[in-house]
Amino acid sequence: MQHNKRVAVAFLDLAFNKKQPQAAADRYVGAQFIQHNPLSADGTGPFVAYVTWRTALSPELKFDFKRVLGEEDLVAVHYKRTYDSADRGAAVMDIFRFEKGKIVEHWDVIQDVPETSANDNTMF
């Protein structure tokens, strides 16, 4: 389980923070990559194309990892995503399914950080 948690964070960090999506896909994704985000097709090609486009559009893009949870073959990574220093950001949860130590399936949930909140708690 600890291996999968490390892989999930390393995958996101290499792809988005270090802007090396092809290296991340080659190193951490299995033979298949099933995508549940309705805006992305299956496979690593669409993932690499999206990250390449997004990081070119937002060179200051940053994923600030907060929590990593795991159970059996699933790992969830909770983080704050910001596009630049002026961005309030979004709370993101990526969920990965693993086979033989490699990522093979992905889900995500994204919620923008609002300007005001009904409570004094943070989203992180």
Image (tube, rainbow, N blue to C red):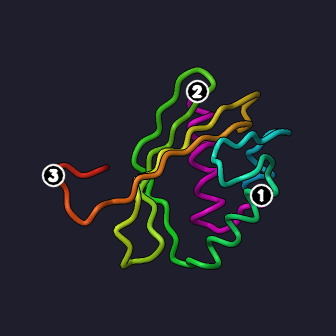
* Residue 70 among magenta residues: no
User: Where are the magenta residues, as a range?
Assistant: 1-23
| Residue pointed to by mark 2 | 1
Q: Residue at x 59, y 29 (%)?
A: 74
The residue at 36%/78% (across/down) is 86
Q: Is residue 53 above or below residue 120?
A: below
Q: Position of residue 110 (x, y in %)?
A: 47, 51
Kind of residue at badge 2: Met
Q: Secondary structure at mark 3?
A: loop
Three-letter amino acid code of the residue under disc 3 = Ala
* Residue 35, numbered circle: none
| Nearer to me, 80 or 10 | 80
Residue 5 percent location from the top left of the image: 56, 37
Q: Are marks 3 and 2 in contact (CB under 8 Å)?
A: no
Task: Give the labeled residue for mark 3.
Answer: 118
Q: Residue 51 location, x and y as percent? A: 67, 65
Name the quarter where the N terminus is drawn: top right
Q: Are marks 1 and 3 in contact (CB under 8 Å)?
A: no
Mark 1 highlights which residue?
A: 46
Kind of element beneath mark 1: helix
